[in-house]
Image (tube, grey):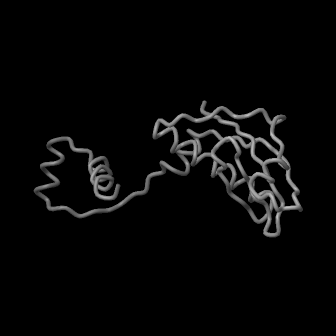
Amino acid sequence: MTTRIYPACFYKDIDGYSVIFPDLNWLATDGKNLEEAMRNAIDCLAGYLYYEEKENKKIPKPTDISKIDPIKIAKELDPNDKSIDGFVNYVSVDIEKYAKEHFEKSVKKTLTIPVWLNELAIEKNINFSKVLQEALMKILL
């Protein structure tokens, strides 16, 4: 199981809520209300951890929630903000499950190739999806 849990600071603002992950390079998201902010926090955390792991980058361990002061963090971000209304909460995500549902979900594509090329590829046991994916990544990335 690849469930990861990180503390996040939630701040009430004019447009809804802002969310900051202090352990993850001040990774941030927001939402129009608390529910949307939490959904976006899960998505943000999942995406960040997924791609950091894919790149074999070192991911810091989460800080104990009791050691995070949302007011202090808000002051670091904006020393002039006097109206800070925030709290800290854990955000958890099963990265493997989330990635399968959101990042690695496949879509079906139809393509046209000459008959002779199709027959030759079948004869050589070519995986059409794999070849197309590799070619697209080579061209696009």
Q: At x 54% / y 45%, what residue is drawn?
A: 99
Report x, y in % for residue 124: 15, 42
Query: Is residue 54 found left or right of 61 in the rendered image?
Result: left
Name the residue nearer the viewer: 7 or 119. Answer: 7
Name the residue nearer the viewer: 133 or 24. Answer: 24
Q: At x 66% / y 32%, what residue is drawn?
A: 61
Report x, y in % for residue 30: 72, 60
Q: Residue furthest front?
A: 79
Picture quadrant of residue 96:
top right
Quadrant showing the C terminus: bottom left
Q: Residue furthest bottom?
A: 14
Q: At x 77% / y 59%, what residue is drawn?
A: 78
Report x, y in % for residue 94: 63, 39
6 relative to 136, above or below? above
Q: At x 78% / y 69%, what residue is drawn?
A: 15
Name the residue nearer the viewer: 135 or 7. Answer: 7
Query: Is residue 132 found left or right of 50 in the rendered image?
Result: left
Number of numbered markers: 0
Name the residue nearer the viewer: 104 or 85. Answer: 85
Quadrant showing the N terminus: top right
Query: Is residue 135 found left or right of 106 in the rendered image?
Result: left
Report x, y in % for residue 72: 82, 47
106 relative to 83, above or below? above
